[in-house]
Amino acid sequence: MNLKTLREKFKKIVIGDELNPHDRSIFHRLSLVAFLAWVGLGADGLSSSCYGPEEAFLALGHHHYLSIFVAIGTVITIYVISACYSQIIEVFPTGGGGYLVASKLLSPTWGMISGCALFIDYVLTITISVASGADALFSFMPSTWADHKLAFAVAGVAALTVLNLRGIKESVIPLVPVFLVFLLTHVFAILYTFVTHLGNFTEVALKTAGEVQATRTEIGFFAMIILVLRAYSLGAGTYTGIEAVSNSIPLLREPKVETGKRTMKYMAASLSFMVLGLMLAYLFYSVHPVPGKTLNAVLFENISAAWGGYGQTFVLVTLLSEAAILLIAAQAGFLGGPRVLANMALDRWAPTRFAMLSDRFVSMNGIFIMGISAAILMILTGGSVRLLVVLYSINVFITFFLSQLGMVKHWLSQRKNVEKWKKRFLVSALGLILTAFILVSVTVLKFHEGGWVTLLVTGSLVGLSFFIKRHYNNTLQTLRRLEGLVVSTFGATFESNTPKDKRDTADPAAKTAVILVNGFNGLGLHTLFNVIRHFGDTFKNFVFIQVGIIDAGTFKGAAEVEKLEAQCKKDIDRYVDFMKRNGFYAEGHTSIAHDAVEEVAEIAPKILKKFPHSIIFGGQLVFPDDTFLSRFLHNYTVFAMQRKFYHQGIPVVILPIRV
């Protein structure tokens, strides 16, 4: 067994079999119903109850009973933001994450800024979720094991990266039992607290009123309001993940809009219950911080203190489920992050390779970059949840703010065309006010504690995106000029010097030029005319091959794939018709696939069998400055094809095209 076979078997075991893009049922099989979407996407929001309420509670210092106002404000905000994103799902039924909403409703530049913030946010989602999971797990472990927590967290990121390479649905389904255990244990703990403390609600209300009076006397009314608002802002991590559903609509089961809105309802209800329930439970059990333990860990130990051995088992299962749900929450980063990168790549704000899909129809490059970035961030921060929360909260609200600003503008522009536009406008306007307040307050409060790092990294990514966009725009303009130049210079001369009788019959014994094209464009025309210029009338037959690449832009449904197939055939027919009009035999071969190299390798032997005297030609752009960045921004697929064909003894000529 050779190395290649071993590599393929290992890939099949780890990632799975290749999927068939021609199977029209594949979109149904890979999509998520509302419940699975709640697990894979909503777990991010639900898991924030493991650290968001704690951050808000601790921010109040010894004024614990003021947390009731923070909890009520948090629940209201959850429902407002959820309602805003339900509207976004309706307006953008094919997917409307922060990037697309800002791009369409504000401007492409604001969309790019939102996309950069969202990308960083999803990396932080993975990092903070895994780090919090490690904290929850090690809260139950002996303190001597603490040195292994960072290694465990990095290993968790690596495991999730591999799991996501297998595919969206396969990465979510195994997590369902864990999600249900988390939900059941936490709902039980909260309900148990409420039932056993029914007589204490009046006491809590009285203590809250007393706390308000005492705090107002101690620091003043306005200072008390600022204290509550500060805690409310610092608990902003609670709202993260709400946007994940609208960003991932293409992953949902038809009817996508209804599935998305149902998922949003599940998320809002479950998260609100958790936040309000946990913060009240902290008060009922007078929970205080314990070094090396989360507040939830302390709470669950207090709840089960009188249960004996059953109590220890309950705490262990509950904390394990917290660790697991936080790992599941990282799924939102792996599902949403590559999709944001893919959308930005389709608009040329990011390298186009991030729009490519693997044979499992996942964005392999996007998943790798998310996993690697999260692992690096985990190591740099030492897996500190408190530091990561600071970095986390700012970026998500940049996206929230821009999305709601776009929706406010949208409802104003559509007020004559949409019924009940005022109600929709007020929802978006309220969302805009809340998200703007939290964004500004968190940025100001946490700027010197590490918030500046987030702004610096996001700003650097924005600058890089501008550079990438300019490079692609310059290349596109050059190719368009090249197309006009090639047609005017070579096309007219070629047509005037060749016979005009069409040839519909091939001569298999004649020399044949097999030309690889990726559309009827300057690159393909330049390659064709260079073959004619350099080889004269050597070739009597011309065969054109075009592989339509199924990327994130086309893998949205069977109709999009059919549209791609039709466009490929249309492009090839133009080449074939052009050569036939100039007296040559020509034919075209088209296909769709996720990998052009492997697909051409399947097509080429059939052509060579029919035309044994064939040479394959491909064009390659050559830039004046061949840098690492220029090589990264362009795929150089033709060189990969050349290497593959050389091993099969098939001659391949690469014609340089200077730009």
Image (tube, rainbow, N blue to C red):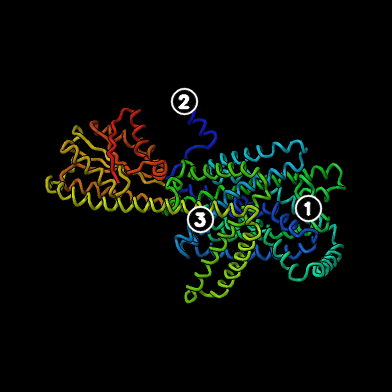
| Residue contact at pointers 2 and 3, CB within 8 angstroms | no
Classify 348 as above or below 653: below
**Image coordinates for residue 75, horizontal then vertical, percent:** 69, 63
Q: Nearer the viewer, residue 373 or 424?
A: 373
- Amino acid type assigned to the residue bearing label 1 in the image: Ala
Q: In the rendered structure, find residue 442 and report the number of the disc placed on it.
A: none
187 vs 262, left or right, is right
- Under mark 2, the amino acid is Leu
Q: Give the structural element (helix, strand or loop) at label 2.
A: helix
- Gap in angstroms between the C-alphas marked 3 and 1: 38 Å
Q: Which residue is mark 1?
A: 189
Instruction: Single out the residue that lies furthest toward the bottom.
Output: 416
Mark 2–mark 3 Cα distance, whole angstroms, equals: 40 Å
* Quadrant in the picture for residue 446: bottom right
Residue under the point 28% across and 40% down: 656
> What residue is pinned by disc 2?
3
Which residue is denoted by mark 3 in the rendering?
A: 115
Vertical arrangement, residue 501 with respect to residue 611, above or below: below
Alpha-carbon distance for marks 1 and 2?
54 Å
Q: Are marks 1 and 2 in contact (CB under 8 Å)?
A: no
Q: Amino acid at mark 3?
A: Gly
Q: Residues within 10 Å of mark 1 (few under 14, many from 20)?
A: many
Classify mark 3: helix, strand or loop: helix
Image location (x, y in percent) of residue 375: 59, 41
